[in-house]
Each structure stands twice: as structure tokens, then as C-alpha cells.
Amino acid sequence: MDARLQRRVQRYGWDKAVRHYEQFWARQLEPSQELLLEMAELRAGEKVLDVACGTGLVTLPAAEAVGPDGHVTGTDISEQMVLALADEAKKKSLEHVSYERLDAEDLRLPDDRFDAALCALGLMYFPEPIRAMVEMHRVLRPGGRCVAAVWGERKNCGWAEIFPIVDARVESEVCPLFFQLGTGEALRYAFEAGGFTDIRIQRLSTILEYETAEDACGAAFAGGPVALAYSRFDEETREAAHAEYIDSISGFRNGNGYEIPGEFVIGLGRVEK
């Protein structure tokens, strides 16, 4: 897929998803985000960059970790996501949080500016993730660290059929290589290609719990990466896509709800001093 087109798909897709994102994903993503923050070992007074910050599910806890003497900058390609973060930071009176709409592959930030860079479940969406790794390495100070989380292997993510289900109905090519970085040692190689050393990788198995079929569909279609394509579906197409997706996760049904397996891979790399 053309890189410029993919960036547009991500920008406007997440603009569409922002209203539903936290409703359907905040609880489900929490295990990966907690481990990412634990591995980052943020300290009071540090300057932190959160790339692909979304609504701030990692940005705001990071701001609490570094305290008012530190600073956290959240960036995202989606303007609506950045605005959502701005609203939350204002509500929480976190004046040491700033935000900007930026492409992760072209951050346009000064060299050697941050002590830590975070990227929670963003790399899979970038057309050229190595460029993003190089950019995060560039803006980190010597001795700084980067922590990034991606979804794991396709076979370990029970919701994975959402992509072919959508692609069969609209020529979206949403995230054609979505699971690549979670496969084998791919995330480690991405850190190495970005210039990082002292790399550590952890895999985390999890269960995505949804109380109803409607919630499971809301997460898969309206609140996630296929939101832009989904917005083009008429009612008949939506109903058919919902039915096919529910059938694809039928093996994970528990009563009226669903317990869908998932896997995350979290990596840590450092900039040489």
C-alpha cells in the first residue's frame, strides 16, 4: 500500500474511532500499558515523549509518574485523538502535559530532547515503523530509553479476522502488515534497526472481555483501526459484517459475552551514552 495513503487512512480512521476508543478498549489494553510503563521506569523530573498517544491512556499516567517537575509530550497523527488528550489533561489539571499532531515517522522535534520515548500499540499502524524507531532514537538523550508495545502473533489474537472481513467489503487494505512486528523476533530487529542497544523483549498473553456481542462488534469495527472503512458501510453491509465477525469469535463465547485471547509484545531499548 502507498505510504502516503496509509498515513491518511490512519489519520482519518482514528479521527472516526476516537468517540468509541476508550469505551471499548481502555480496560482491554490496560495490561499492556501497565507493563510498558513498568519497563519504562519513569522518574520524577524526566521529559517523556509518547508517540501515537491516542486519547492519553499512557500519556496521563506517565505525567503522574514524572510529576510537575517533569514533562510529557503526546503526539499522534490523528487531530481528534490529540484534542481528546488535551481535554483530559485539562480536566486533570496536568499543566506539564503538551500535545501536538505529528507523524511518528517525521517528528519534527529537536535532537536529544527526551529521557524516555513511549509508543503503546502504535508501531503496527506506521507504513515505515523503522523510520519511527530512528526518529525516537534521534530525539532521545544519550542513555535514554524507548519502550514500545505491539500486538503479538496473529494466531494468538482471536479477533484477527476483523481485517479480512472488512477488506472483503471495501478496498481498504487496512494495516496489511498489522501482525508483522509481533511475530518472532521482529520487534527486537526493529529496535536494532532504529539504533537501540541493551534490548529486552517481553510477551504478554491476555484476555479481551466483552459483556455482549454488541460490545465486541463496537470494539472491532467502530473503536479500532477499521473505523474509517466501517464508516462507509450501509446498514445491510454492517449487519452482514457483524454476523461474520461474531461467527469468527464464536469459540470464545462465555454466556452472553466473549473472552477473546490476545497477545502483546513489549520491547525496551536504550540509546548508548
Image (cartoon, grey):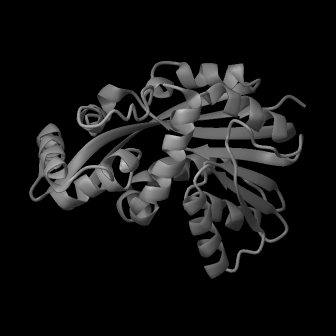
Q: Position of residue 123 (x, y in %)?
A: 57, 36
Q: Nearer the viewer, residue 250 or 217?
A: 217
| Residue 214 showing in the rendered view | yes
Residue displayed at 19% across by 60% down: 214
Count of numbered labels shown in the rendering: 0
User: Residue placed at 76% from the left, 62% from the top?
Assistant: 66
Q: Is residue 252 left or right of residue 270?
A: left
| Residue toward you, 214 or 253 | 214
Eyeballing the image, is 177 above or below 243?
above
Nearest the viewer among 148 and 74 is 74
Figure quadrant of residue 7: top right
In this view, 117 is above or below 126: below
| Residue plotted at (69% across, 28% down) | 131
| Location of residue 149 in the rendering, given as x and y in whole percent from the top left corner | 55, 39
Judged left or right of residue 186, residue 221 is left
Residue 121 is at least partly visible in this image: no
Q: Residue at x 25, y 44 (%)?
A: 260
Q: Is residue 7 left or right of residue 271?
A: left
The quarter in which the C terminus is drawn is top right
Residue 240 screen position, x and y as percent: 13, 46
Position in image of residue 17 (x %, y %): 42, 57
